[in-house]
Amino acid sequence: MTSALNAHWQGQLFAAYALQEVLDKPIDGETPQSRLKQLGMMTVLYMMHQNHEKLTLSNIVKNTGLTRNAVAETVDPLIERGILTETIVKNSMGRGTARQFEFCPEIFDRLRLGAEQRKPGT
């Protein structure tokens, strides 16, 4: 189980990672407003991930109060950056499809290594 200190460090490292990936590596034609929205979205998605919630378009809409289009506009650049992956899954009713997102596993590997390096006494 992750200790409270490790969870704290992982959260801090995630925030630093998000800032670096989004602000230091702009996508062509992207506005500063779009980058700030992406940072906010990454925070929401990270909290949902930590709470073991599925990162579906519907769940994100429910958590943020944004429209589906606004969520898609903010999430799509995160996919383009390689921060998120997208899969098409069956919706919660099992009849249609839904967009589901996941953080790329490499992100958490990097964060885990960073948190381990910051353990007291190391």
Image (cartoon, rainbow, N blue to C red):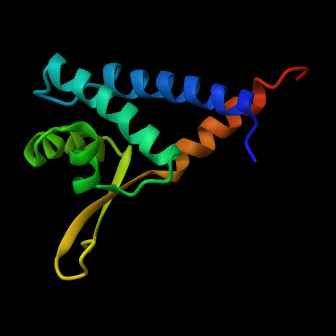
In-image side of 99 versus 14 (left or right)? left
Q: Is residue 83 above or below residue 15?
A: below
Q: Which residue is pictured at 18% across the width and 17% down the height? A: 32
Residue 94 rendering spot, x and y as whole percentages: 25, 81
Residue 35 rendering spot, x and y as whole percentages: 23, 24
The quarter of the displayed image where residue 29 is located:
top left
The quarter of the displayed image where residue 70 is located:
top left
Total count of labels: 0
Of 95 and 42, the residue lying toward us: 95
Residue 42 rendering spot, x and y as whole percentages: 36, 34
Q: Is residue 52 above or below residue 4?
A: below
Of 49 and 18, the residue lying toward us: 49
Q: Which residue is pictured at 85% across the width and 21% down the height? A: 120
Q: Is residue 61 above or below residue 3?
A: below
Quadrant of the snapshot with the C terminus: top right
Q: Which residue is pictured at 24% across the width and 37% down the height? A: 64
The quarter of the displayed image where residue 119 is located:
top right
Q: Which residue is pictured at 91% across the width and 20% down the height? A: 121
Residue 34 rendering spot, x and y as whole percentages: 17, 26
In-image side of 95 versus 118 (left or right)? left
- Name the residue furthest bottom: 95
